[in-house]
Image (cartoon, rainbow, N blue to C red):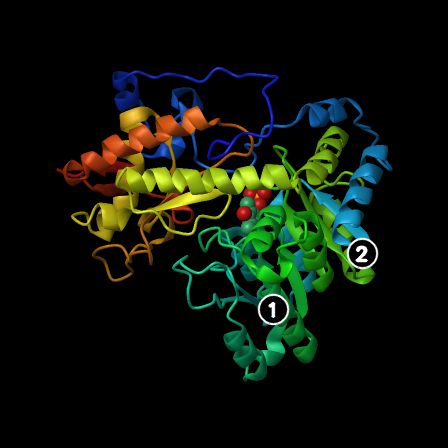
Amino acid sequence: MPAFMEPFRIKTIEPIPFPTAEERQSALVDAGYNLFRVPARRIMIDLLTDSGTSAMSAAQWSALLAGDESYAGASSFERFESVVRDLTGYQEVIPVHQGRAAERILLGSLLKPGDVSVSNTHFDTTRASVESAGATPVDLPAGDTEASSPFGGNIDLDALHDYLAGSQGRRVRCVVLTITNNAGGGQPVSFANVEGARRLCDEYGAMLLLDASRFAENAFLITEREDELADRSPRDVAEMIFALADGCWASLKKDGLANIGGLIALADTDLARRCREQLIAVEGFPTYGGLAGRDLDALARGLMEVTDTKYLRYRAETAQWLGDQLTKAGLPVLQPTGCHAVYIDAAALLPHIPPHELPATALANELYRAGAVRVSELGTLVFGRVNPDGGHDVAAPRELVRFALPRRVYTKSHLEYVVETAATVAGNASTIVGYRIVDQAETLRHFSAVLKPLG
Ligand SMILES: *Cc1c(COP(=O)(O)O)cnc(C)c1O
């Protein structure tokens, strides 16, 4: 068998653009050297994100036609609800249009001003929802987020215990486990870690919630890396994890295998009732929650397909293969790779570019210039801050570049092209220059910032 093989064949195709060197250069200039501002028709291989970029199966496309667009009580909702109940065991199922709507509604209904939410790492939209409820997000990632441990996404259980037992402990309303830990490099959370968090939540009276946007990928990595669960299926492990928590939300733009959608699922009927009141105000009636009936049918089918072991193995092996090839091509890759992306340490590749000159942005832009490959920067442009005292920006902890893998979209030959492009860029690393920001928004500056190359 080859290193990995796509466990599907292609039925519908979409041509990809082949911009010339001149077109790539002018696209960069026109975009203010910000890849978010480059039009997709100028991108050959788009690894910007795995969110909402999945290819649907033939079964999902045919499910779209079965969509029931009735305003209230649509049968599409009944099918969606039944799949989510089977998977999670939670009786209360609330659809929303995407993950951040779920966070806003659930955390807004649960948290009161002065409360604390403790997490392995709140994803940035999660953090924003906690704060907008007047509560405080506290991140307690297990020491080793250097991604060298098999479960680099874990929460630090000792620190969680100390926090719950400490002076602020009574303020903790919920513990949130983000599976996999997106902001922490897409690393998984172990089953033992979820069990440990469950025990502490029981002892101190906090709710245990999952940000389950990549629940299937997390479950698969558990079957690969946690000996006790090696003979269970990813679907079994996913069910066991949901059974440990009190509820979850998810962006279904990831493991829903569709292009839009989100959900809240809860055991608590009263909390679900409060969520539905909010839902009606901001998303829609509880049986569609901001989605079309056909979306609910595509998602119901996607949630059944996503725990397929062959699919998940292919996905993990793709990331591993890409990581190994990029390493051979001379790029510093964070190991072990997870499922949804491969991360490169731009600071190690470009030691001559200091953080305030945005080495991760510089690397991402060179990948585009060299081969119309789009990746995302997760360095000082995204996580740094303007220095309140003037002077250089406060640097991010790390200067990472993320090669995200859209689900079921690109083939191995596409990724071979990405590796070739990256090898060319790595070979010219010493000639790459940094950037300065000439225009930026106050929040989420990376989406719209305008940059200029130095030198
Ligand atoms: C994407 C994501 C979200 C937000 O979901 P959207 O669908 O983009 O609104 C929340 N949490 C995690 C872990 C995510 O990856």
| Residue 395 image offset from top left, x and y in percent | 29, 56
Residue appearing at x 25%, y 45% in the figure: 359
Residue 394 visible at all:
yes
Q: Residue at point 75% right, 32% down?
A: 297
| Quarter of the figure with residue 33 | top left
Q: Is residue 92 above or below residue 21?
A: below
In terms of secondary structure, where does tag 1 sit?
loop
Q: Identify residue type, mark 1.
A: Pro
Mark 1 highlights which residue? 113
277 or 454: nearer the viewer = 454
On the image, the x and y values in percent for residue 42 come to 38, 21
> Badge 2 local density, few (<14 within 10 Å), some, or many (20+)?
some
Q: Is residue 275 above or below residue 65?
A: below
Q: Say whether mark 2 is within 8 Å of ligand 1.
A: no
Residue 32 in sight from this viewpoint: no
- The disc at residue 273 is 2
